[in-house]
Image (cartoon, helix red, strand yellow):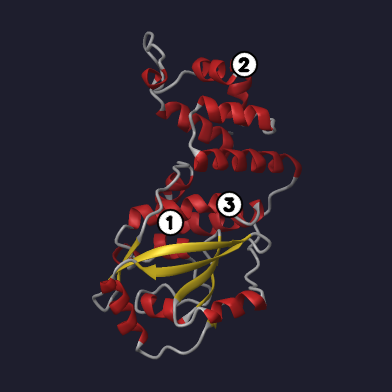
Amino acid sequence: MGTPLGKFIRTKRDSIQPECLGLERLGRRRSPGLRRLDLATRAGISVEYLARMEQGRDRNPSPAVINSLADALCLNSPERQHLRYLAKIASDECSVLVRPVPPSRRVRPSVLQTLSLLEPGVAVVTNRLGDILAHTTGYQSITRGTGLLDVAEPNLNIYLFTDPRSRTFFADWEDIADEYTFDLWQAPSLQNLEWLISELTPLAGPEFTNRLFRHAVPRRGALTLNHPDGHRLRLLRETLEMPMDAQQLTIFLPECEETAQAIDQLQRQPLGFLRSVQ
């Protein structure tokens, strides 16, 4: 059985055409992209060792090997970071028994206080699993009527893949689904990731799992939302990482004056106060 690390290396190897690296395409190939020999030679490792990594039989490569593979595969910065993370969790899997457990939903009081200072702006606290942990009334106003916040413990991934309204609400649904599934690889822990996968897979099926294991680094641009009230919102996102909590504070800013006016109209409808959904 392979590992996410091995699958990512194989996926990237298959996606590179030999001609792009100045290599000749010799004879018929059983698979697209680089041969294992081509990549091993470029990375300075043996073909046998590369095969063990791709097949999940070697789960503890050194940082030097990971860096050499990143160079050989011509990975960009986000892809390099992802490769290093997959190497880390492959090593962790060797030393711990992965049992699915939900992550903590607690938000520190100081984070909630910071969030309150952003009122009436649009902001939300999430974790890498897509759990919505706290939000401003501004966030509530732009998601009202979409179903996202209708449950006790809202989760963006569950909403994306199980609620048909999400495909209308998120104008670029495919891109957003790529973003949130890719971010699952940065889950607070392996146990947390396994928990969400075990919860979501029976509901979402191959559409979710195929996207998750494709390991495609997403393009993150402006967020376009189709509000049920008829407004089309174009939002810029600024995300502040909180490593000690494995959480993020995301602030949404209008990209244009039309969006700013639409948000102002939506916020005029009373919605209550800052809400924590722990």
Where the C terminus falls, by quadrant?
Answer: bottom right
Q: Quadrant of residue 70?
A: top right
Where the N terminus falls, by quadrant?
Answer: top right
> Foreground residue, 202 or 142?
142
Specify the amino acid type for callout 2: Ser
Does residue 192 sit above or below 230 in this rendering? above
At numbered mark 1, what does the secondary structure look like: helix, strand or loop?
Answer: helix
Q: Which mark is residue 227?
A: none
Q: Earlier in the sequence, mark 3 or mark 1?
A: 3
Cα gap from disc 3 to disc 2, whole angstroms:
30 Å
Q: Residue 265 at what x, y percent from top left?
A: 30, 84
Q: Earlier in the sequence, mark 1 or mark 2?
A: 2
> Foreground residue, 78 or 85?
78
At numbered mark 2, what does the secondary structure look like: helix, strand or loop?
Answer: loop
Q: Are marks 1 and 2 in contact (CB under 8 Å)?
A: no
Which residue: 46% across, 31% down? Answer: 12
Residue 58 visible to the viewer? no
Residue 239 visible to the viewer? yes
**Residue lying furthest left in this view?**
230
Specify the amino acid type for callout 3: Gln
**Dot 1: within a 10 Å radius of its alpha carbon, few (fewer than 14), some, or many (20 or more) residues?**
some
> Is residue 19 toward the left or the right of residue 97 in the image?
left
Q: Which mark is residue 204?
A: 1
Residue that numbered label 3 is attached to: 186
Which residue: 36% across, 66% down? Answer: 235
Specify the amino acid type for callout 1: Ala
**Dot 3: within a 10 Å radius of its alpha carbon, few (fewer than 14), some, or many (20 or more) residues?**
some
Which residue: 32% across, 75% down? Answer: 260
Q: Residue 219 at what x, y percent from top left?
A: 40, 48
Residue that numbered label 2 is attached to: 46
